[in-house]
Amino acid sequence: MDGVLVDVQASYIATVVETVRSLSGRPIDVSAIHDYKAAGGWNDDWALAQHLVGQLGVALSYEDVGREFQRIFLGTNGDGLIQRERWMPTDKTMDSLSASFGFAIFTGRPREEAEYTLQRNASAYSFDPIVAANDAAPKPAPDGLLLIRQRLEGWVVYVGDSVDDARSANAARVPFIGVRSAHSSSARVVDAFKELGAIDIIDDINDLPSALEAARASLPFR
């Protein structure tokens, strides 16, 4: 979801920055967050914020960091940084995809945050199943994708923008299409996509319809 359907630079990523500043009293450059994400293993933004705060000399529990993160992200009256998210697929892209494919989501977001963003931006489309935080082991574990495969018939392909997405797809034996990030460390992530056997790497989610058609025509999937 994040980095594929939704640009989260001004929401989740900015919330990590603000959480670290709030709890440590010190700023952190956003490039450090991208470097951690590029390395993989940091799909949980609460855990990443806790780690970064600890690196700055402040030891706090996961729960304490999470509470501050949610305060900043959700706000008090619907005015949190979640409002700054930007939906990336155009209506044309969504219509094209929905004509040939169903939609499912495997995300590290809590379910209510995933559903809120979908309702706000894509209420005309059905996403089923949605495997969210606490529904399955977090990426890069394959459990969420395996749950989706159990629910769906036919060809399943996973689209993601992170190393953990690619590792999850690889472990689940699900074809993977990588979305190249416009942010720092993208070359490192693209190299990982290739090493993990991505069937395609695209620059923009709006390139997905043509990528899927090419993959479906050339690969032995039904």
Image: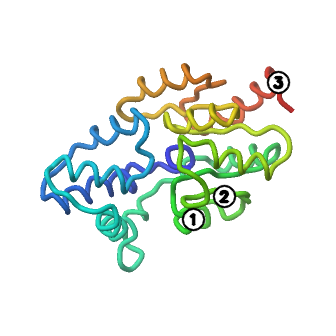
> Where residue 91 sits in the image (x, y, percent)?
66, 51
Q: Residue at x 82, y 46 (%)?
A: 99
* Structural crowding at the residue carrying mark 1, measured as other residues with C-alpha within 10 Å and reported as few (<14), some (14–19) or many (≥20): some
Q: Residue at x 72, y 49 (%)?
A: 148
Up/down of 204 relative to 85, above or below: above
The residue labelled by disc 3 is: 217
Where, quadrant-wise, is the C terminus in this rendering?
top right
Tell me the quarter of the picture where residue 111 sits. Answer: bottom right
Which label number is shown at residue 111?
1
Q: Are marks 2 and 1 in contact (CB under 8 Å)?
A: yes
Pair 1/3: label in front: 1
Q: CA distance from mark 1 to mark 3?
A: 34 Å
Q: Residue at x 32, y 53 (%)?
A: 14
206 on left or right of 74: right
> Where residue 189 sits in the image (x, y, percent)?
45, 28
Tell me the quarter of the picture where residue 63 sits. Answer: bottom left
1 on left or right of 30: right
> Where residue 92 sits in the image (x, y, percent)?
69, 46
Camera-side residue of 90 and 148: 148
152 on left or right of 80: right
Camera-side residue of 144 and 111: 144
Q: Are marks 3 and 2 in contact (CB under 8 Å)?
A: no
* Structural crowding at the residue carrying mark 2, measured as other residues with C-alpha within 10 Å and reported as few (<14), some (14–19) or many (≥20): some
The kind of residue on which mark 1 rests is Arg
The kind of residue on which mark 3 rests is Ala
**Circle 3 SS class:** helix
The residue labelled by disc 2 is: 130
Q: CA distance from mark 2 to mark 1?
A: 8 Å
Q: CA distance from mark 3 to mark 2?
A: 27 Å
User: Which tag, 2 or 1, sits closer to the chain's start?
Assistant: 1
